[in-house]
């Protein structure tokens, strides 16, 4: 009993709701892990990535397979995203107002800078490019929507990671060893955290040839109605460091205009409801 005489016990119905929410969170973690890794994963691998027991992962996978969001290879028994998830993602790319509205703004950045302009989001420890406008000086990889890139080695990824709570950062980049792509790639977590502090202080992120030897990126946030980064707008290419300040100013202006436009039409998402992922490490692995 509480001091006011009311009961603090959880009712049977509330207990089921809590269990259902936990199951959804765990299923989402499995879907995120499969998105981060383009190759099929076995149950033991998945269990390590999502920090659950293999038994729990197996039961959740059975449900995800039954609804078509996950598929299992009949020869290797490993799992990958299913056609149901592919369909949902494809529809979202062509109907989501943030992605659609970004195309005009990215085109302006690409025309002004001469380099590629990209809109991306964070999925676990990877970034996924949602839209891209090519500049006249494009010399990097061709645009592949949905192709995951390592967040720790690119400006857009570092930007979005920098604004996550510490526990979510640990879940995103602390499970696997950070891979080195160039001599400039940051692979030390303490150094990465110091990098995040600098990003938050200045409001934008830079990668200095950390992913590609041939190019670098600068990224600014596109914020939601609560002021939290919703996506990253990035300019990517052989950027002249002497023009960084001017490019940041241009990117911030365009990103702010995009947020204002979406807000005016009612299409700007709100961050008022932000489920925490702190339970990833603190919740016991109970069924």
Image (cartoon, rainbow, N blue to C red):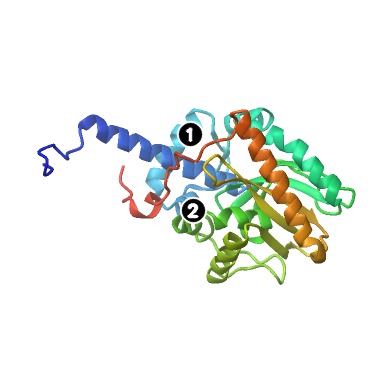
- Residue 90 image position (x, y, % from top left): 66, 31
User: Quarter-wise, where is residue 20 in the image?
Assistant: top left
Residue that protrudes farthest toward the right in the picture:
136
The image shows residue 37, relative to residue 240, as above or below, that is above
Q: Using residue 13 as the reference point, say whether residue 21 is left or right of it.
A: right
- Residue 262 image position (x, y, % from top left): 64, 33
Local SS, label 1: helix
* Residue sitting at x 80%, y 51%: 141
* Residue sitting at x 71%, y 72%: 183
The image shows residue 143, relative to residue 167, as above or below, that is above
Q: Residues within 10 Å of mark 2 (few under 14, many from 20)?
A: some
- Residue 286 image position (x, y, % from top left): 30, 46
Find the distance from the CA under tag 1 to the CA under tag 2: 17 Å
- Quarter of the image containing the C terminus? top left
Local SS, label 2: helix
Q: Using residue 200 as the reference point, say whether residue 156 is left or right of it.
A: right
Q: Residues within 10 Å of mark 1 (few under 14, many from 20)?
A: many
| Residue 102's disc number | none
* Residue sitting at x 73%, y 54%: 249
Residue 146 in sight from this viewpoint: no
- Residue 190 image position (x, y, % from top left): 53, 70
| Residue 64's disc number | 1
Q: Which residue is mark 2?
A: 49
User: Quarter-wise, where is residue 161 in the image?
Assistant: bottom right
Q: Nearer the viewer, residue 160 or 281?
A: 160
User: Quarter-wise, where is residue 207 in the image?
Assistant: bottom right
* Residue sitting at x 50%, y 52%: 45
- Sequence-wise first label, 1 or 2: 2
Q: Using residue 281 as the reference point, say whether residue 114 is left or right of it.
A: right
């Amino acid at each position: 009993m509480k001091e006011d005489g009311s009961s603090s016990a959880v009712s049977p119905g509330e207990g089921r709701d809590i269990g259902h929410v936990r199951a959804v969170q765990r299923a989402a973690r499995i879907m995120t892990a499969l998105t981060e890794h383009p190759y099929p994963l076995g149950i033991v691998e998945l269990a390590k990535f999502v920090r659950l027991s293999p038994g729990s992962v197996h039961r959740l996978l059975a449900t995800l397979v039954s609804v078509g969001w996950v598929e299992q290879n009949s020869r290797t028994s490993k799992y990958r995203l299913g056609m149901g998830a592919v369909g949902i993602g494809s529809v979202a790319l062509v109907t989501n107002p943030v992605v659609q509205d970004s195309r005009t703004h990215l085109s302006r950045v690409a025309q002004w800078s001469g380099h590629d302009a990209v809109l991306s989001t964070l999925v676990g420890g990877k970034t996924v490019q949602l839209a891209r406008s090519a500049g006249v000086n494009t010399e990097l990889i061709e645009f592949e929507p949905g192709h995951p890139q390592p967040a720790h080695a690119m400006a857009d990824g570092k930007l979005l990671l920098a604004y996550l709570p510490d526990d979510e950062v640990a879940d995103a980049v602390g499970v696997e060893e950070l891979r080195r792509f160039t001599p400039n790639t940051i692979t030390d977590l303490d150094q990465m955290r110091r990098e995040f502090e600098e990003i938050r202080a200045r409001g934008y992120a830079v990668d200095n040839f950390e992913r590609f030897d041939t190019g670098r990126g600068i990224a600014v946030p596109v914020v939601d109605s609560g002021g939290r980064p919703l996506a990253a707008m990035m300019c990517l290419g052989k950027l002249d460091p002497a023009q960084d300040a001017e490019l940041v100013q241009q990117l911030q202006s365009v990103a702010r205009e995009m947020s204002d436009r979406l807000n005016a039409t009612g299409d700007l998402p709100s961050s008022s409801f932000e489920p925490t992922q702190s339970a990833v490490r603190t919740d016991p692995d109970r069924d």
